[in-house]
Image (cartoon, rainbow, N blue to C red):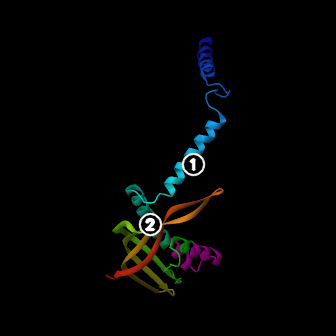
Amino acid sequence: MRRYLIIPGALLAFILFSAKSCKDDPGISLHDEEEALNSFMDSVKDGFSASYLDEESLFVFTRNAKQKLVDYSDFMNISNDSSLDSVFRSQAMVMVQSLFGEGLSPARVSPGRVTYIDSIWLIEPLHLAGDGLYKGELGFREEAVIISGEDTVTSNAAIKKLEFLATKSKKVIGTDTLIAWQVCLGEIYLLQTP
C-alpha cells in the first residue's frame, strides 16, 4: 500500500519543484511587455488596413460573400413568414440591409414566399476595380415557393447573378477606429428562368 502512495507523491513533488517561479523574470520588464503588445497591435492594424488584398484574403472574402448570400435567403424567409412576430420579422429586414452595400437592397417583403438557394458558383473572382474597391460576381440557382391561400402553391426557379464588393470601411475596435476591409452584397440580376 505504501508503494501506491510514494509514486503519486513523488510525481506531485516533481511537478511542484520543476514548475516555474511566480516571481517576475528579471530579463523581461513591464516596458518590454508594453512594447511587444504595441508591436502586435500595429501588425494587426496593418493587416486590416492593407492597401491591396492578397490571394488568400480574396478567397476568404469570396467565401464570406457566398455565406452572406445564404444568410440573405434565410433572413428574407423570416421576414416573409407572417406567422412570426412583427418585431422578429422587422429585425430580419434590418439584417438583410446590413448584408448589402450602402444604398443597395433588392429586398421586398412578399408574404408567403419561401426561397431556397440550392447552388452557388463563382462567375468572376474578386478583382481590383478602383481605389480601395474589389468587385466579383457569383451565380446562383434560386427556387421560390409561393403559398397563397390554403391550396395554392406556386413554384419557380431562376438562375441569378450577384455582384459582391470588398471595400474599406471604418471599424471601431475598443477605443481605436480602424479602416478595414469588408465584403458586402451588391445588385442581383435575373439571368435565366428554366
Q: Would you say residue 106 sits in the magenta stretch? A: no
> For the N terminus, which image quadrant?
top right
**What's the residue type where badge 1 is placed?**
Met
Residue linked to disc 2:
65
Kindly identify the amino acid type of the residue bearing the numbered disc 2.
Ala
Q: Quadrant of the C terminus?
A: bottom left
* Res. 171 image quadrant: bottom right
> Residue 91 location, x and y as percent?
61, 73
Q: Is residue 151 left or right of residue 13?
A: left
Dominant secondary structure of the magenta stretch? helix
- The stretch of residues the image draws in magenta is 74-94
Between the residue at mark 2 and the residue at mark 1, the CA separation in whole angstroms equals 27 Å
Sequence-first disc among 2 and 1: 1
Which numbered tag is attached to residue 8? none
Query: Which residue matches tag 1?
Result: 41
Q: Position of residue 132 (x, y in %)?
A: 46, 66
**How many numbered marks are there?**
2
Q: Which residue occupies the extreme top position in the image?
A: 2
Q: Is residue 191 above or below residue 67?
A: below
Residue 26 horizontal side relative to residue 143, left or right = right
Q: Determine the residue positioned at 50% across, 64% down.
A: 182
